[in-house]
Amino acid sequence: MDAIVLLREDHKTVEKLFKRFEKTSDDDVAERRRIADEVIEELTVHAWIEEKFFYPAAREAAPDTKDHILESIEEHHAVVWMLSEIKGMDPADERFAAKMSVLMEQVRHHVEEEEQDWFPDVRKAMGRNRLTELGGEMEAGKSRAPRDPLAVPSADSK
């Protein structure tokens, strides 16, 4: 699978989880916990494969995207930090839904920037064959990606 297609599929998966969460009520604490746990795993794996495989390849193929990549890494850092907080929170906590809401806003902004402003440039620079090869590497990498946001190295330690 093409690397950009793989990332877009991840984005769709997370957006569906966000929509499910938004439909829950304050009484649905068990469902909120289940959805939040799925979001935590999906976003942790996604951020890891993006930083491990996609960003370095994109930066090499399209050096002028360096600033976008650096900003994306910092956005990931903020998201992973929020995920680690959500992981440790009681879904009955009055701040749980608010924290999830802020997470959703940040992720949606990040996705919009990637898909509209950045992916087209990367697609043009990399070409179909390289994107397909990279997609295979990323797909294989998912199996060894951390599922716990606390296990993700910070951007500062890379």
Image (spheres, helix red, strand yellow):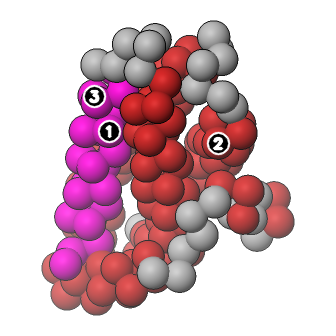
The residue beneath circle 1 is: 17
Residue, x 50% and y 36% (percent of image)?
Answer: 33
Quarter of the image where one finds residue 124: bottom left
Tell me the number on the disc at residue 137.
none
In the picture, the disc for residue 19 is: 3
User: Which residue is denoted by mark 2 in the rendering?
Assistant: 87
Residue drawn at x 49%, y 24% is: 29
Q: Earlier in the sequence, mark 2 or mark 3?
A: 3
The residue type indicated by label 3 comes to Lys
* Disc 1 element: helix
On screen, 50 above or below 41?
Answer: below
Question: From the viewer's perspective, is residue 97 above or below residue 69?
Answer: above
Residue 12 shows in the view: yes
Q: Amino acid at mark 2?
A: Lys
The percent position of residue 77, horizontal first and vertical second, equals: 67, 47
Residue 23 is situated, as x and y percent measured from the top left of the image, at 28, 19
Mark 3: give few (<14), some (14-19) or many (20+) Cα within 10 Å. Answer: few
Q: Is residue 109 left or right of residue 129?
A: right
